[in-house]
Amino acid sequence: MIAGYFDESNSHAGAKVLTLCGFLADPRIWSDLDQEWNNILDRPCWPNRPREFHMVDCVHGTKDFEGWKLPERLAIYGDMVGLLCETNLIAIGSGIVIEAYECLSVEHKELLAKGGFFEPLDLVFQCNLQFAIDATVRYGKTHTPPVLDDLGLLFDESPADVALNYHRIYAHVAAKHRSGKLLTGIGFGKSEKYIPLQAADILAYTTCLWLQKEHLHSTSNYDFPIIPAFMRMIEGVAAEGGMFTERAMMTLIGQELINKANKELRF
């Protein structure tokens, strides 16, 4: 079985971008990562032993990182990113510039809704699910003979209404995707309990920074620099086509218009 762990970044009201990112791997790789992750957290050089690595808290020196000096916070961040780059994980992610969606006409939003895209979360979540399915199929083909692994997904704990949206989108994708039978379900957990969710948090947060810088030309003095090796991972994620900018939104609209026309021709 392939397990995927995902987290959102910038899901609060008024955010300019939204990202949903995570990693896929088999249980053996996740077990090794858990051990190495805890080894970093346990190091006696830190001012205290964090209960978990949470990117926002590390950047701003809050909660578990209150009282930490900037070099200490940069050091543990670098160690965590280094571990992620060295581990054989499959990075997956999607993001959307909120304004690119909000500026669509009513007609275009209605068209997207008919395709199952009711809000920005639908776009990034459906994109991630399809990426995860495709990655699992590719992973199975690397075996001799090829295997067809099950795919289970865990997301960082969300409010009840958001969780319901996740389940709605999941059911939609599982029903329409040709390889939806791979999906065994989705669940939600606390990042303090599941270390892979902490890893997903780093990827989601950092991809959010990348998206803001690349497409909104926005930066913050509070944010950490993106380590070059991790930048290459984020650019690889973006290259898959899951970043919904203004141009990408219009491409999606064009595809939905083609889908609509094809359906009308069949009837």
Image (cartoon, grey):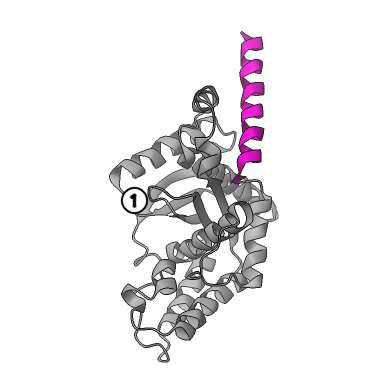
Where residue 138 appears, as percent x and y from the top left, is 67, 50
Is 56 included in the stretch rendered in magenta? Answer: no
| Residue 90, quarter of the rendered image | bottom right
Question: What stretch of residues is rendered in magenta?
Answer: 243-267
Quadrant where the C terminus is found in the figure: top right
Residue at label 1? 158
Q: Residue at x 50, y 72 (%)?
A: 33
Looking at the image, which residue is at 46% across and 64% down? Answer: 196
Q: Is residue 182 visible?
A: no
Q: Nearer the viewer, residue 92 or 20?
A: 20
Residue 11 visible to an observer of this rendering: yes
Q: Nearer the viewer, residue 248 or 165?
A: 248
Residue 263 colored magenta? yes
Name the amino acid type tagged 1: Ser
Q: Is residue 117 above or below residue 259?
A: below
Check the image and report above or below for 14 versus 236: above
Query: In the displayed structure, does residue 34 sit left or right of residue 236?
Result: left
Secondary structure category for the residue under label 1: loop
Q: Quadrant of residue 178?
A: top right
Residue 193 appears at what percent x and percent y?
34, 66
Measured as percent of width and height from the top left, residue 98 is found at 50, 43
Task: From the viewer's perspective, tell me whether residue 72 is left or right of residue 226.
Answer: left
Q: Quadrant of residue 189?
A: bottom left
Query: At 39% from the left edge and 64% from the top edge, which residue is drawn?
Result: 194
